[in-house]
Structures are given as structure tokens and as C-alpha cells.
Image (cartoon, rainbow, N blue to C red):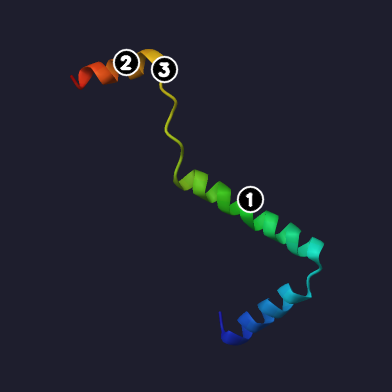
Amino acid sequence: MTFEDLVRLINMIDALTDREFETLYNIIHIRAMRRAQARYPKPQDQKEGDADEMQNSDL
């Protein structure tokens, strides 16, 4: 991306109405959250019995 491209992008963002900016922000936020969840998935929930067995195995 050249400096001129960056200037054009900033000018386009400045020209957005508040509603358009909020919509664009929400779209970017949702995509970022989906990428983060795909990259760093939550650990699977353990069953209660599995957690007890893991604690006892450390003893």
C-alpha cells in the first residue's frame, strides 16, 4: 500500500456518516473475533469425573 493509497483510504473513512462508520466498525470487529476464535479455540469443557481424575493423578 502506497502513501497515496493510505491517504485515499483515510479520506474515504472521514467521508462516512456515523451510521456507515458504525456498520463498517461492526463488520471488522465480527471478522476479527471470528479469526481469533479460529486461531485460539476455547479448550473443550471437561466432564466432572474427568476433572476429579486429573486432580487425583497429580497426587
Which quadrant is the N terminus positioned in?
bottom right
The amino acid type, in three-letter code, at marker 1 is: Ile
- Classify 11 as above or below 31: below
The quadrant holding residue 45 is top left
At 40% from the left edge and 15% from the top edge, which residue is drawn? 48
Q: Which mark is residue 14?
A: none
The amino acid type, in three-letter code, at marker 2 is: Asp
Say which of marks 1 and 2 sits in front: 2
Question: Is there CB contact under 8 Å for labels 3 and 1?
Answer: no
Q: Position of residue 37 (x, y in %)?
A: 51, 44
Q: Which residue is mark 2?
A: 52
Whichever of callouts 3 and 1 sits on the residue coming sooner in the sequence is 1
Q: Is residue 49 left or right of residue 55?
A: right
Q: CA distance from mark 3 to mark 1?
A: 30 Å
> In terms of secondary structure, where does tag 1 sit?
helix
> In terms of secondary structure, where does tag 3 sit?
loop
Q: Position of residue 43 (x, y in %)?
A: 42, 33
- Classify 47 as above or below 4: above
Whichever of callouts 2 and 3 sits on the residue coming sooner in the sequence is 3
Q: Which residue is mark 1?
A: 30
Q: Position of residue 17 (x, y in %)?
A: 81, 68
The amino acid type, in three-letter code, at marker 3 is: Lys
At 63% from the left edge and 50% from the top edge, which residue is drawn? 30
At 75% from the left edge and 64% from the top edge, which residue is drawn? 21
Q: CA distance from mark 1 to mark 2?
A: 37 Å
Q: Which residue is mark 3?
A: 47
Q: CA distance from mark 2 to mark 3?
A: 9 Å
Q: Is residue 43 left or right of residue 2?
A: left
Say which of marks 2 and 3 sits in front: 2
